[in-house]
Amino acid sequence: MSEYDMEDIAQALVATSKGILAADESTGTIKKRFDSVNAESTESSRRDYREMLMASSGFADYISGIILYDETLRQKSADGRPLAEVISSQGVIPGIKVDTGAKPLAFAEGELVTEGLDGLRERLAEYHQLGARFAKWRGVISIGNGGPSSYCIDANAHALARYAALCQEANIVPIVEPEVLMDGTHTIDECYAVTETTLKSVFDQLYEHRVVLEQMLLKPNMVISGKDCPDQAGIDEVAAKTIYCFEQTVPAAVPGIVFLSGGQSEQQATEHMNAINQMGSHPWEISYSFGRALQASALTAWGGKVDNVPAAQAAFNHRAKLTSAARDGAYDAKMETVA
Ligand code: 13P
């Protein structure tokens, strides 16, 4: 018998008023984020930045779980405690990104497939020992140049399902993340079509791989216009098309859908999630697993300087509070300006 139930973990991650903080940027990605605010990226600056978020007063009020990168799960706080313990002692659940990135897919110009299955069983056993109770794997699908191909969609869906099955075998809740990218000039209807096809393929593969739907979470993109599409869909259209797409494709047994923000601004991601949650009750909980849309203001306020820590923590708390309100459908844009 295990000491906890994966269904309980999945449900705790989507508890009312709470969602997930994605702080699992790879070393390359976090360097780009730090570069953008002129902060140096070193092992200790990465630790200081992430520890600062975990030490924010509102962290445990609005955050149910935090996704870490391998390096962070192994790090200790400035006072010598493993960061996984700093997190779990606040009642927040530590998670881990386990894919090793998206690589070019053979014979499919411009398309990617996510790698990381080799040795995953052994890595999951170690991550479990280090305290991780859920995991994440991101597949990337892009629209444009005639794509995506069904070859790319199915290859990514297959890898996501193999990963999810290995996680459940290791008593770790898998977050299954097929991301249809916002980059491009495509319309919201093109995003809808690709997202629907992708989710159908993902759930077919999850079924084939015997994944228990009650013990996983889905982390999808919203159905949204491409970033460079001249005709940008409004908030209500995004909410309606996103929900309709999930109704067609996501089984009711899945306990929760946790969105990625995917390059939306903090306010845009919050407004969309609020509108989606205001659309009535759904078979699944709908919450967040945001990276940039929870961290952007805090990162800018921090800028790598210790003196800025209080301002950065205030910025993080404010954003997390608004995102939490949106998760409950109780956000109002007026809240943006009230500290
Ligand atoms: P964004 O919210 O910045 O898209 O990050 C979420 C994430 O975890 C992507 O894999």
Image: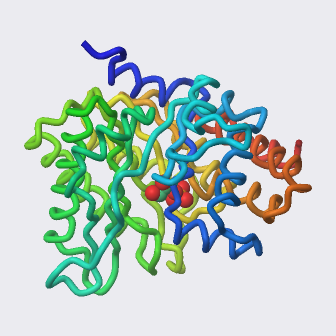
Give the position of the N terminus as an image quadrant.
Answer: top left
Give how far across and how far down residue 49 sits, in percent: 71, 54
Asked whether the viewer can see residue 126, the reply is yes
Q: Is residue 247 or residue 74 the one in the foreground?
A: 74
Q: What sort of colour scheme is used for the picture?
A: rainbow
Q: In the figure, 91 relative to 296: above or below?
A: above
Which residue extends farthest right? Answer: 307
- At x 38%, y 40%, the residue is 127
Give how far across and how far down residue 43 sits, in percent: 62, 61
Give how far across and how far down residue 331 sits, in percent: 70, 38
User: Number of callouts in the render?
Assistant: 0
Which residue extends farthest left? Answer: 208
Q: Quadrant of residue 201?
A: bottom left
In the picture, measured across the screen, residue 82 lies left or right of residue 242, that is: right
In the picture, measured across the screen, residue 216 lies left or right of residue 207, that is: right
Q: Quadrant of residue 212?
A: top left
Give the position of the C terminus as an image quadrant.
Answer: top right
- At x 63%, y 48%, the residue is 270
Q: Is residue 19 or residue 251 the one in the foreground?
A: 19
Q: Is residue 19 or residue 271 the one in the foreground?
A: 19
- At x 66%, y 50%, the residue is 50
In the picture, measured across the screen, residue 71 lies left or right of residue 257, that is: right
Which residue extends farthest front? Answer: 80
Give how far across and how far down residue 140 sits, in percent: 34, 66
Q: In the figure, 339 relative to 98: above or below?
A: above
Q: Quadrant of residue 298?
A: bottom right
- At x 64%, y 49%, the residue is 271
In the picture, measured across the screen, residue 84 lies left or right of residue 223, that is: right
Asked whether the viewer can see residue 261, the reply is no
